Each structure stands twice: as structure tokens, then as C-alpha cells.
Image (cartoon, helix red, strand yellow):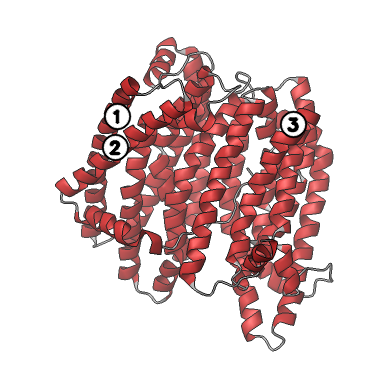
Amino acid sequence: MVKDFVNLLNREFKDIHQAAIVIAIFTFLSQILGLLRDRALAHIVGPSEALDVYYAAFRIPDFLFVSVASLISMTVLLPVLSKKVNNSEEGEDRAREFFSQVCTVLFFSLSIISAILFFLMPFLVDSIAPGFSEIAKHNLIEVSRIMLLSPILLGLSNAFGAVTHLYKKFFVYALAPIFYNLGIILGIIFLYERIGIMGLGFGVILGAVMHLAVQIPILGRHKFLPKFTKIKDKKEIRELVSLSIPRTLAISLNSFGMLVLVSILSKLNEGAVSLFSLSYNLQSVPIGIIGISYSVASFPLLVELFSKNEIDKFVLHMTSAIRRVLFWALPIATLFIVLRAQIVRVTLGTNLFSWSDTRLVAAALGIFSIGLVAQALIHLFVRGFYAGGKTSKPLFVNFISTIAMIGFSVLFLQFYQNNETFRFFMASLFRAPEEGAGMLMLPLGYSLAGILNVMILWIIFKRDYLKGQAFRVREVFSTLLHTLAASCLAGIFAYFGLIVGDRFFDINSFLGIFLQGALGGILGLIAFTIAIYLFDDKDGIAVLESFKQKFWKSKPIIPEDENLN
């Protein structure tokens, strides 16, 4: 059995459908482990000062990862290595030498910055979490210092991924995020009770080590294990880094915005950081499945069409992708809003996770879901502009939306704290307890900023590419209106399913609440499907027929990690 597993690790998947199936299976397993990770945190640690510290401790290492490690991303490094292996006179030897230089630069850059941050951490903590107690700040310093190893390990692992892709070892690459989550889970289960909050930090490092280590045998077999070496190709490495700068700046802005939100949350109730983070992780699942998958899948063709100056086809493909994202994201967002309590109770409702915690996370998830469609579309628009060589426009819009997110969050929080009517309205609307519900203003700010972001991106895209193509705009709005109407109908039937399920299932048990949510979700999806056919929405019908016939033939996409947690 061990021999079979080793053979599978070394297997080269030349058939794209075989590779797609392997990646699909392990992407699903990674998502399941991510949910189990959060459930373990809710069960063993619970929304508390300790869990607040754990989530806050990601912020500086996460910012380091996205602002430095992502400068040498797999997507940029892979084409360079492939070109050297296939075209250079030296072949693989030249590629190995260049790869060692890249890893040397990456390792020392991250190590030096991590060392500086290690000593600056006591001063940075007051900015990250000014509202934490002195004990919590002390723990935050220690855990953050431990986690500073993770951007080094994951940065190198990200570079290693270029080699595993180069030799089509998709099984190994798909395993890496599973091992990362597994390491964190092991830290939660076995280390937290023994050494406390530090155990959670060491669990993250264990996960990062496993993320890196699973790829080492492949690099060793192909003699690509990097060595510390003199940097000879400085110009080429600078060009490599320059290609990643727009994307790096964009995700750095997102990371900075989240850092500010954590700083605000630290001044609220104990557990606010935890509850916000848990709800954020839940809403990220459909965004990753829909938005990132469609955007990454569309990117190569968009680049090809634009490079050939086939602008009409570029616009056709882009607007078609927009309609597909709307078609999937709108009903999912609606069902997330209606079924939010069931989703939270099934995934997190255990042991130390109280009913009050459930209500707050469910409310936050509902608010996040308001902006779910926008967040999914943002990924598509950004890559569309990248394909057209207009990298500065999404970066500028992202800067505006980050400022708006912070501004909206502060404004709504101040209004919530000072206006009793608004406080009662928000708590009643999302069925949240008034105590601790101030944290809901941050998901609200986040969602509204996302909607603003996608509106500006749409206006710019329409101005740049849709002049004289009003029919394309009508197609998008037709899909929007039909899908929105069908989604509302799905929400009504899903809510009806919850009422019926409440009468027939014991909703105080895990199985009962799961069956209630499943009944609501199934009725909602059936209603959505029937509505699409009744509206005779040809675009939606085509998607449903294609999904029914070719589900197992579709190529799933695994995006690069953009955050540590």
C-alpha cells in the first residue's frame, strides 16, 4: 500500500481529464479539512480571547506572505522554468541553476524581513490589536513570532509548486493544502491542551512544513532541490518580480484592510475577532469555488484573444463569464442568507460554541453573503483587466474599495453604538443578540465596499470595451434579472423547507439541523431550476444542461494560496 502511494506521488498526469479528477477530489478534501479545522477550533478553543489571539496572530505573517513571497509566484515562475527546460541550450541544468537563485533570493528576503519583524513585534502589537488585554498582547507577540516562520516555508513551497506543475505532478500539488490544514488540526487537537495558545501557532508551522515537505521528493527526483548559490541572473529575477507587482500590491491592500478590521474588532467584545474570522472563512468557500475558478479558467483565453487583437471575442468571452458567475453566485448567496443558521450550526455548533455565538456568526455570514456576488465578480474583472494589460485600473479601484471598507466599517460601528433604533433594527433584521452585535458592522462595511468595487470595475469595463455593444450589456442585465427573480423564489422555497423541517426533525440534534438545512437547500435549488425554465432563460438553461451533461468532464481550478489561514 505504501509502495502504491509512493508511485501515485511520482505519477505524471499527461491526460488533463485524469489530472482534473485528481485535483477536484483533493480540492474538495481540502475544503472539508478547512471546515473541520474551524469546527475543531470552535469545539476545543471556542470564541474567546485565546481564539482572538490565534486569528490576530495571522495578520503580520499573512501581510509578509502576500507582500513579499507572492512577488515570486508560481504562475510567473512556471512559464520561465518551462521555457528554460524546453528552449535553452543547457536545458534542465540551466533551469535548476536559475531556480536555486530564485529560492535563494526568496529565502533570504523573507528571513531578513521576518527577523526584523520578530524584534519589532512588541511595537506592532499595539497597532494590530490595541483593544486586547496585556496578557492577550503578550500571547499575541509570542504566537505571531512563531508564525513568522510560515511565510518563509509557504513562500518556498509556492515556488516548489512551479516544479511540480512543470513535471505534471498534480497529485502532489493537490496534496499540499490538505497537509497544511491537517497540520493545523493536529496542533489544535494535540498541542493546545498541552502548551496552550502556543500550540496553535506550532500547529500552523507544522502545517506549513508539511505543505513544503510533500513536494520535496518530486524536486529531489528531478534534481531541482535548490541550493544556496550566488545570484548571477539579477536582471532576469528583477523582471520576474516586476511581473508580479500589480497582483502583489492588490492582495497586499486586501491584507492591510483585514489587518485594520482586526484592529477595530480587538476593541469590541471578547471573541469578536474569532466570530468575524469564522464567518469570513465560511463565506470564502463559494467565492473560491465560483469566482476564483471562473476567473482563473478564463484568464488564458482572455490573454490569447487580447494578444491577437480579437476584441469582439474578448468581450464575448468576458461577458459570458460574467453571466455564468451571476447565474451561480446569486442563488448561492440567497441560500446562504436563508440557511445561514443551519450552515453555522452544522459546521461550528459544538461544545464551547454557544447559541449566542451561532446567532452572531450566522448574522455575520448573512451580511457577508450580501456582497458574495460582488466578491465573486471582482476576481473575474481583475483578471479581465490583467489580460488586457490594464493592471493599474483594478489596483486603483482596489485602493478605493479598501479605504471605503475601512471607512464604512468605522462609520457603521459608530452609528450602531450611538443610535439605539439602528442597533435594534440590525439585531432584529439578522436575528442576532444585541450584545456583541457591533462586530456585524464590519461585515456590512466589507460587503458594501465589495459592491462599490465591482460597480466601479463594471463602469470602467463598459467604458473601455462595450462602446457600441449595447446588446452585450442587455445580455448581462437580462441574466441578472432572471437569475435574481429565480433566486428570490429559491429563497422563499428554502425558507418554506425550514418551516417544514422544524416540524419533522429534531433541530436540537446535529442530524436534525442538517436534515432541516438540506431540505431547505434542495427545495430552493429545485425552485430555482424550475424558475429558470419557466422564464425560458436560454443562457441559464444552457448552463444547467451543460452542467448536467459535462459535470465530471469540467476542469476544476486550484488557485494559489493568497493567505496563510
The residue most toward the front is 1
Left or right of 35? Residue 457 is left
| Labelled pair 1, 3 in contact (Cβ < 8 Å) | no
Residue in front for this viewpoint, 366 or 232:
366
Q: Where is residue 277 drawn, in percent x and y? A: 57, 33
Q: Residue 243 sits in which quadrant?
A: bottom right
Q: Position of residue 253 (x, y in %)?
A: 58, 45
Q: Which mark is residue 497?
A: 1
Dot 3 and dot 2 residues touching (CB under 8 Å): no
Give left or right: position of 195 versus 5: right
**Viewed as shown, does residue 336 lie left or right of 242?**
left
Residue 354: x and y in percent read 55, 19
- Name above or below for residue 177 compared with residue 268: below
Compute the Cα span from label 1 to label 2: 8 Å
Instruction: Report the amino acid beneath label 2.
Output: Gly
Give residue 524's mark.
2
Say few, some or many: other residues with alpha carbon within 10 Å of mark 1 (under 14 / 14 to 19 / 20 or more). Answer: many
Q: CA distance from mark 1 to mark 3?
A: 40 Å
**Residue at position x 50%, y 26% in the image:** 361
Residue drawn at (52%, 40%), measured in percent from left and top?
Answer: 402
Amino acid beneath label 1: Gly
In-front residue for pair 449/355: 355
Outermost residue toward the top in this view: 420
Q: Residue at x 56, y 51 (%)?
A: 250
Disc with the residue nearer the chain's start (3 vs 2): 3
Q: Earlier in the sequence, mark 1 or mark 2?
A: 1
Q: Which residue is mark 3?
A: 192
Q: Classify mark 2: residues with Cα within 10 Å, few (<14), some (14-19) or many (20+).
A: many
Q: Give the residue type that dot 3 points to.
A: Tyr
Given contact means CB atoms under 8 Å apart, are the residues at marks 1 and 2 in contact?
Answer: yes
- Secondary structure beneath dot 2 equals helix
